[in-house]
Each structure stands twice: as structure tokens, then as C-alpha cells.
Image (cartoon, rainbow, N blue to C red):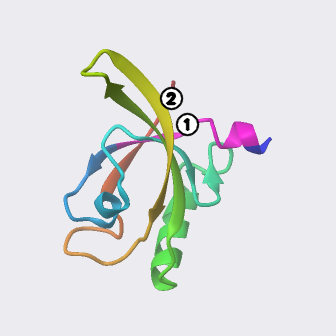
Amino acid sequence: SFQEESTTPFAIIDEVSPNSPAHEAGLKKGDVLLRFGSVHSRNHRDFSAIAELIPLAASQDKSISVSVRRKTVELGGVVEVIKTEKLELRPRTWSGRGLLGCHIQPYSE
């Protein structure tokens, strides 16, 4: 089901470079990836689906809708809240490596 596909994490962002497209989109280290455009936990094919999507979006100057799950601490560190954020990521050439400026690792709960 769509619900299940878009709530099952499959990757974690373990690095975001300053001033990169990923940084500008609001991605943060520790964000857990639920959906990356049309890619989700059931169809990412060991991330090759993401690798195909990025240059395509860059060449068409399109942004990719990304859903992440993020832990935030609120009330001065008393409460830990897990929120789902939806971000728009625009892959493009920038001063650093790649088209995103973030590093993604496989994630398992």
C-alpha cells in the first residue's frame, strides 16, 4: 500500500555538505529517508533507482519531493518528537562533489 511504502525507512542521511543543494533543501544529518521522488522502500533496488533519478532531475532542472523522518528535541530537551518532513530537493552542479551534496547510507530499524 502507498501508506506502507511511504512510511518505511530505507536510508539515512549521514552527511550534508554546507551550501549544497541538500543543505539548501533543508536536509539534515540523521534524517531518515522514507521517500525520494517515486523511490521508496520497496523499489529502490539498492539505491540504483535514486542514482538514476538524480541526473535526470538535474538535466531537466526539476526538484524532487523527499519525505524524511526527523527526531527533534523540544521543550529544552525534555521531549523527543519524531516528525515527518516533506522537502523539495533540486539536484544541480554546485562547488562540491555530485549533484546533491549529501551522503546516504542504507537504513534498517
71 vs 3, left or right, is left
Find the magenta span and give its range.
3-13
Q: Nearer the viewer, mark 2 or mark 1?
A: 1
Q: Position of residue 38 (x, y in %)?
A: 64, 59
Q: Position of residue 88 (x, y in %)?
A: 47, 63
Q: Is residue 99 above or below residue 45?
A: below
Residue most toward the top? 78
Q: Is the residue marked by circle 1 packed among few (<14), some (14-19), or many (20+) residues within 10 Å?
A: many
Query: Disc 2 vs disc 1: Cβ atoms closer than 8 Å?
Result: no
Q: How many marks?
A: 2
Instruction: Identify residue for label 1.
Output: 9
In the rendered structure, which amino acid carries the disc numbered 2? Ser
In the rendered structure, which amino acid carries the disc numbered 1? Pro
Quadrant of the rendering where the N terminus is positioned? top right
Is 61 included in the stretch rendered in magenta? no
Residue at (47, 84) in percent of width and height: 59
- Could you tell me which secondary element the residue under label 2 belongs to? loop
Q: Position of residue 102 (x, y in %)?
A: 32, 55
**Towards the viewer: 78 or 22:** 78
Indicate the quadrant where residue 105 lies: top left
Residue at (33, 51) in percent of width and height: 103
Indicate the quadrant where residue 70 lies: top left
Indicate the quadrant where residue 71 lies: top left
Instruction: Identify residue for label 2.
Output: 108
